[in-house]
Image: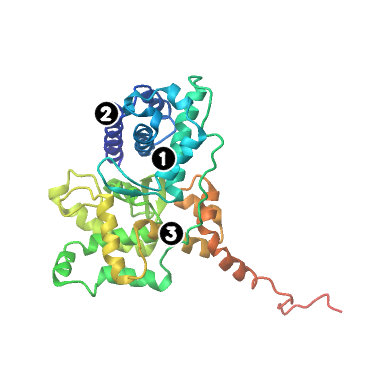
Amino acid sequence: MSEYFDQRDIKNSEKIEEILKNDLPDYCREYFVGISMNTTSLTRLNYAYDIRTFFRYLVNKVYRFKGKSTKEISLVDIENLSPFEVEAYLNYVEIYRDAEGRIIKNSARGKSRKLAAIRSFVRYFIKKQLIRYNPTATIDTPKLREKEIIRLEGSEITTMMDVVDAPEGMSERQQKYLENTKIRDLAIVGLLLGTGIRVSELVGIDIEDVNFEDFSFVVTRKGGARVILYFSDEVAGYLYDYYALRVADESTKDNPALFLSLQKKRITTRAVENIVKKYSQIATPLKHITPHKLRSTFGTQLYRNTGDIYVVADVLGHKDVNTTRRHYAAITDDIRKRASTKVSLYDTDDDQGGQE
């Protein structure tokens, strides 16, 4: 597994380097080095994209920067920005065309992330005493609407697994293709639904990470921490069927990855997303189901069965329990309703001692 994540980090670092080389001033390199100890490579890459978008906005839309390139924006320019200019940028990114002419839209969540990138950037150089004024300090974070959790309910979970196992509504070509992938796909969908792991964690699992003696497996969480998780008997059945085929394939004995594509390479996150989409469109055509929605499905089921938000946070790998609480606040009414039936006003025991 470590090799896979090492390769992913290398690719992300190479993309950051390309952005620094072609689009950002030299002092930006100091920022990305400075935050490297406390951020993942993916977070830094997303910040690089967002900072590049901001700098491109400045040279193309702010009159006093006309004629400058993004690499010529100085720290003095950043310090002299007004709060209005940053707010105007957030208004601009709601819908705009990127450098390739594609239309890009950002919800409040997307704008909030872009503001967070700029704030992190400015605060770093204030901390290093290279600038003193923070143009983002008085800007309100875009208000986020609580999104309804889209998930599978009990019967829909069964339907989803049935569709993977014996699909209906697929073309003859799709069914023929499925003959080569059904056992793998059952293991993938079963593992997502039965453990709530992220799709990035699933694709990173190696053969050696799975232990059928105690029904456990190792995943690498966001941030690089490796943790042991457990799967149920049901998931074990699906997983072992695929595992047995996987280890028996001599042609892939040098590939450590557990889940492989038909090209005998480690499966990608995009491929897993397409697998989930393919089956969910048949199982629940009115719901847009993604691997993350399967994660929400697991979290919801676990919360309903335990009523313990801390257990859910720990199993899902949330660093802050408030993140979990926000995601599953909508189902606390279920817990409260069940709690109302747990305490009786009358003692139902046979022994009624003490009554007058």
The local secondary structure at tag 2 comes to helix
Residue at (68% x, 71% y) in the render = 343
Picture mark count: 3
Give the residue number, with chain letter if any, for mark 1. Answer: 225
Nearest to the observer: residue 201 or residue 147: 147
Measured Cα–Cα span from mark 1 to mark 3: 21 Å
Q: What residue is pinned by disc 2?
A: 22
Say which element carries label 1.
loop
Indicate the amino acid at tag 1.
Ala
Q: Which mark's residue is nearer the viewer, 1 or 2?
A: 2
First-in-chain label (1 vs 2): 2
| Residue at mark 1 to residue at mark 2: CA–CA distance | 33 Å
Foreground pick, 160 / 245: 160
* Residue at 28% across, 46% down: 206
Q: Are marks 1 and 2 in contact (CB under 8 Å)?
A: no
Mark 3 or 2, which is nearer the eye?
2
Category of crowding for the residue at label 2, using alpha-carbon neighbours closer than 10 angstroms: few (below 14), some (14–19), many (at least 20): few
Q: What label does residue 296 carry, if any?
A: 3
Q: What crowding class fits label 3: few (fewer than 14 Cα within 10 Å), some (14-19), or many (20 or more)? A: many
In the image, 135 versus 28, the foreground residue is 135
Residue 251 image label: none
Mark 3 or mark 2, earlier in chain: 2
